[in-house]
Amino acid sequence: MKKLLILLLLMTIASLTLVAETRTKGEVGIESRYFSNDTIEETKDSNIAQKARIEIRGNQNNFYERLRVFGRADTTDHNRGVVVIEEAWYGYEKSNLNIKAGAQMLNWTALEAFHPADMLNSRNLDSNVENAEKYGEPMLSLNYLLEGGSVGVYYMPVMIDPNLPKKTNRLRFASFDTGSAIWIEEDGSISADNRSDQFALRVDKTFGPADVSFHYLQHKDRSQPLLVLNSETTQFHPVYLPVKQVGGTLQYIISDFILKSEFAHRGFSKSTNTHLGVLDQKDHYQLAFGGEYTFYHSSGKESGLLIEAQTIQGVSKQERAALSLFQNDILLGHRFVFNDMSSSEFFTSLIVDLERSDELLFSFSYSQRLGDTWKIQPGLRLVKGRSHSDGYGLQQIAESDQVFINLTRYF
């Protein structure tokens, strides 16, 4: 798997040397976060990480390519080190046809925090709980532009493992490290490697003030794994099952108000013929909807009010809790933009569980530029999660209140 990603990266770099025009940009910075003391010796109550991102674009005639790689190294918790190939593709564009081959990052969401339709890319779960960082997914994509829309076909030959927080991490999901990923094939057998034929189709269309999209996705699910004890390794392993997903998004503009919604139906393949026993995830509907309203102050500043809600239907209350942290939740948010020379901005959000009592996630951040090349972003996050016998929900990270400050230099 790693050899394939390295080969993909090298091929993209080599192709960039052949184009007539290349452009480079990137960023370096420091991310620091400080948690309230949980009195657990093995966890790290503070993190200081160095980050870097480099992006190279090139084009010549109808050919173009992009390479974007992100890396993070933590000086206090080496388990947080990660290198992410976000994009590494080569493309061809002519008339209404667009073809790309390589690692690509797709955005199929319309909402701020809840993303039932945006399930294609694997995630780095050691990041924001409500909006985890994405990995580029190796694929071949063909997009054909229509009047007011497009049709996209995608083939994904490789499955990318999500990055799960280790037991030293304050955002860990369990007090132990999980074993390697286990992938299940359509026939119920365990895959020997990360190779698998996966497909997707997406259609989007604009109808006046409305943007609508529909998709069909057949792949190995990375967002709702099973956690299974393997008697051979005596470890718990994340098990990723095949899933067929039908879903879509809607954005509708009414003056300064934007109505947004997403939906997805997820049907999982069941496995009964492995040494791990019966492996079955519940089929369900996942629905999210919300709105954003912007109003303008006389001073030139702007305020944006957000409200979003997500629910999972077709399963019981406990089954919902096993499928997602945000199984029946509402978000209230406020963005205040100063529109000044420093691009100063406040963002505040509160996510409250409507079904499981005493579960909430509060976030606040402020960001502004320092000169032409620097940006600073301090903030805080508060997590409350009542202890439940099922072990689900926010209770695993309920004591992970934190303050953070990020400093980034762009070039």
Image (cartoon, helix red, strand yellow):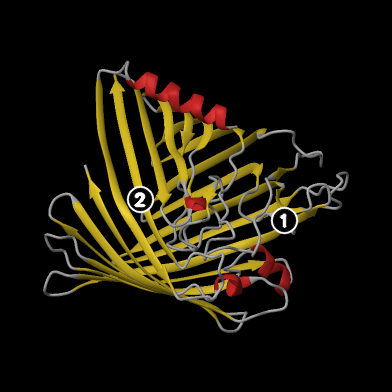
Q: Nearer the viewer, residue 257 or 104?
A: 104
Instruction: Give the residue type that dot 1 points to.
Output: Leu
The residue lying at 55 percent from left, 34 percent from top is 154
Residue 196 in the image: state x and y as whole percent: 67, 33
Q: Is residue 20 visible?
A: yes
Mark 2 residue element: strand
In contact (CB < 8 Å): disc 2 and disc 1:
no
Residue situated furthest top in the rendering: 18
Q: Quadrant of the C terminus?
A: top left
Q: Is residue 143 left or right of residue 391?
A: left
Distance, label 2 to label 1, CA atoms, is 32 Å
Q: Is residue 215 left or right of residue 178?
A: left
Q: Is residue 141 above or below residue 401?
A: above
Q: Nearer the viewer, residue 356 or 151?
A: 356
Residue 125 in the image: state x and y as whole percent: 53, 55
Q: Earlier in the sequence, mark 2 or mark 1?
A: 2
Q: Is residue 296 above or below residue 5?
A: below
The residue lying at 60 percent from left, 75 percent from top is 395
Q: Write down the residue under mark 2.
A: 50
Q: Nearer the viewer, residue 266 or 275?
A: 275
Q: Quadrant of the N terminus?
A: top right
Mark 1 residue element: strand
Q: Is residue 362 visible?
A: no
Q: Which mark is residue 226?
A: 1
